[in-house]
Amino acid sequence: MCELTEIKISMEASAIAVHDLHVQYRTRKGNHVDAVQGLSFSVSSGEIVGFLGPNGAGKSSTLKALMGFVQPKSGSASVFGLACGSIESRRRIGYLPEVAMYYPYLTPLETLTLYGELQGLYGTPLKREATELLDLVGLGAATRKQNRTLSKGMLQRVGIAQALLGSPELLILDEVTSGLDPVGRKELRNLLKDRQRQGATLFFSSHELSEVDMLCDRILLIHNGKFIEERRLDALKTDLRHFALTYSGDLVLGELACASSVVAGRVQATFRDKDLLLQGVQRVQSSGGTILDIIAQEGSLEDYFVETIGRAA
Amino acid sequence: MKAALPLAFVGLGVTSYFVDAVQPQLKAVVAPVGLEAHETHAGASLLGQFRTNMSSWLWLRTDLYLHNGVEMRVLSASELKSGEKGVGTSDKEHWDAESKLVTIIPPKERDFRGIFGDIERASNAFADMKGHAHNGPEKALPLFRLMTWLDPQFIPGWTVGANLLGRADSDAAVSHLREGMAANPGNVEIMGDLGRLYAGSKKHDYEAALRYLEPIVRQKHDLTKMTEDQADALQDAFRWTAMCYRETGRREDQVNCARYGLMFFKDDGVLKRLSSVPSLLVNPKLRAVELAPNHLESKQESDPSHDH
Amino acid sequence: MKIRVWKALARSVLLDAVRRKDLWVVGILGFLIVLCAGALGFFGFAGLEVFAKDLAVSVLGGFSTIVAIMVSSRGMTDEIKNRTLYPLLARPISRFDLLFGKFLGAVAATWVSFLILAAMTGIALSIFNVHFELVTLQYLVLKMIGLTLVCAVGQTLSLVMTTSAAITTSLIVAFGSTLITRALGMGYSSASPEMQGLFKVLNAVLPQYGLFDIGSRVSYSGWGLVPLWVVGALFAYAAGYCAFMLILGWTKFNRQAI
């Protein structure tokens, strides 16, 4: 485990603040494409926020606007209260691009040394941190191989290592798990959780909903460049969770159950939360019914995602 | 655009109909009978191309060598028309050619570029070349030796090289041309120059000159198959042969040769003078026919494009 | 701080260029050609010193220009195409820092290959007793300044066109600017006043790369050193032209969405 320098926790209320952001691109034919349309959200310091949306939703464009790679058409975006894209704001960000290549003829160590020097790190401390980070992402044995000889997954690890370089306060990661195997994903999860514990804020986009599920405090959902929904993940999980009660007896549950049906003489009822379930159990027992089975079912984030996007479309 | 594809298919179909009929004949015609290795082998051909290109590049550099690096160019037609004059040379023999030359880097009075022109004149190999002299030809000789070594069929390498050599050392020039003749047997330009060197002001060995000149003028001549340089060399050969006959007292041969030459080069003043010796009693028609192959005679007379 | 950033970028470009095989192919090819020229003396063609020097400066000038164009012209287009630009610009550096650092890297790579090629050429020719005069040092210095100019043009072109187009245009500009200037000079006296004005503008705008090649003074004997005011003027011109090119490139790049 590398010795990470203590991350300075900033005093600003929001690590990221976006208000009515519009990003527009011009195609080669001269047409305009609205990639982001009036997006507003904020990310607090120390949070892990997942940025979700289908392909072409405008996730990468938003992240690029936060990095200053594209100039917003209108609206505002700031990082720790600093204008997005400014040198000062970038000093506090570690960024992993969606698809990034690294100089093919440099080694991972040379690559990290280059980025470290651009970050303002020098000499032995830089070399030590670069080596430790490469060990941490599992590239300890490949530090002196040229990037062109590395696999896609290994290059993604180089990318993660460079994003973590200099212990940035905010990590903006675009498709962070892309190209990683299950072991790599687990290692990455632990790594990012460690960073959060040290005070870093994480804002990342991903199509891997299981990763989002395991990492995030909150999710932001966008579609066609527009904001759809923002949910705390624990609340969402609670919302998605439901209980199934199977009993024999009369249909007595009424409004307590969100759904009831009779199959082969048995009543199957579904409850949205535990309190309603307990009330339901009491009502069945007091009416002389017999409880046959109670099952707690976790809701699927994927179903939620598909359903919500479907509604928005 | 949409119509192009069906048309292409129709074209292919029509072509394929004829292919079977044509193929056997094509195969018969292109059989590489008698070709040298350099014409059939890709590697040898590539090497050959490199050699000839290198040789041509060297040819272009000789001018620079003679001017010690000062690049020259010929005045354009519009420049000549507007009355611009070349730099000329102290070498009277080459005055005509050099009087149309100017330096590529223009002198200050003809340069619109201001300070850029001043810098180029100060940093490059530039000199005021008015009435300029040339470097000793020996400076360029290694180039000629190299270019003829690279490409023995490059005739100007032999002839111009010998010309430069001959200014200082006519024996060396003769030796150079003999090497060229060995590589290009029967070449009109090389043999003509050899004859001229022997007959010229330094050697005056007319019998030796005739050994090279006579075979040329006695060859079958078809000017339509000759390059401009070869035709010029042939014309010179007629003149020198006739003069050699004159200098050795063979007046009859002189007149006959000159008259035969006039059949190819009707307006040549030198040949006309050499062909009209009043005191001579000869049968010119007879001798001319003896010298000339019959089948060429009538063709040359009827072809005005060969007037020089 | 800035200098460290530029140095880091330049070093990465240099490392990348040195490890690419095409740079070495150019070097080895040039060395072989010069060696062949020198070897002719071994086969008995004495008196070819001028030819050998002429060929040497032509090879040096030609190949080093090609290297300069190859390294500088693919600088920015490849960064954008290969998406290596994102992690770079995610760092706290300005886009000008990136441009300038990469420019310095291209210049360093070109200079290194030029000096290696020059050293190989010198060694190859000295084996055959071909000696160079003092003006050769001036040639090397002025050529290096000229190559810097080519790098600036190549990099700026790489910001407005594809790599292959930038390479082709740079080759035309580098090798054709002298020819164009000569043609303008030939046509100037017979041109109309409007055309003469245009010729002057073209002459001012085109990079005067040919002025930095004093190879003819090296090959042919007796020309002596180039006056110092000329060296100074060429240095000032190159500095001004490079600055102009970099600012032009930065103006475009700074507004560009990536």
Image: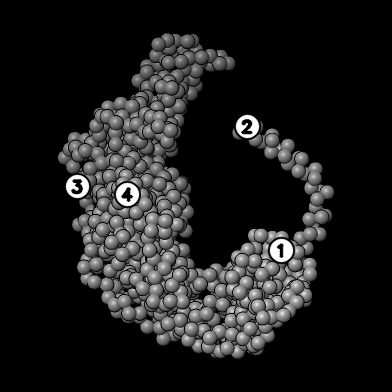
Amino acid marked by disc 3: Lys
Viewer-nearest of discs 3 and 2: 2
Numbered mark located on residue B2 in the image = 2
Q: Is residue B269 above or below residue B161?
A: above
Subunit bearing disc 2: B
Numbered mark located on residue A8 in the image = 3
- Location of mark 4 (residue): C196
Kindly tell me whether residue B179 is visible in this rendering: no
Viewer-nearest of discs 4 and 2: 4
- Location of mark 1 (residue): B301
Subunit bearing disc 3: A
Q: Is residue A242 above or below residue B163?
A: above
**Viewer-proximal residue, A22 or B184?**
B184
User: Decide: marks 3, 1 in contact (CB < 8 A)?
Assistant: no
Kindly tell me whether residue C32 is visible in this rendering: yes
Labels 3, 4: one chain = no
Q: Secondary structure at mark 1?
A: helix
**Viewer-proximal residue, B257 or A216?**
B257
Disc 4 to disc 2, C-alpha distance: 48 Å
Labels 3, 1: one chain = no
Labels 4, 2: one chain = no
Disc 1 to disc 2, C-alpha distance: 59 Å
Viewer-nearest of discs 1 and 2: 1
Q: Secondary structure at mark 2?
A: loop
Dot placed on the residue nearer the N-terminal end, 1 or 2: 2
Amino acid marked by disc 1: Glu
Amino acid marked by disc 4: Gln
Disc 1 to disc 4, C-alpha distance: 52 Å
**Residue sitting at 64 percent across and 66 percent down?**
B266
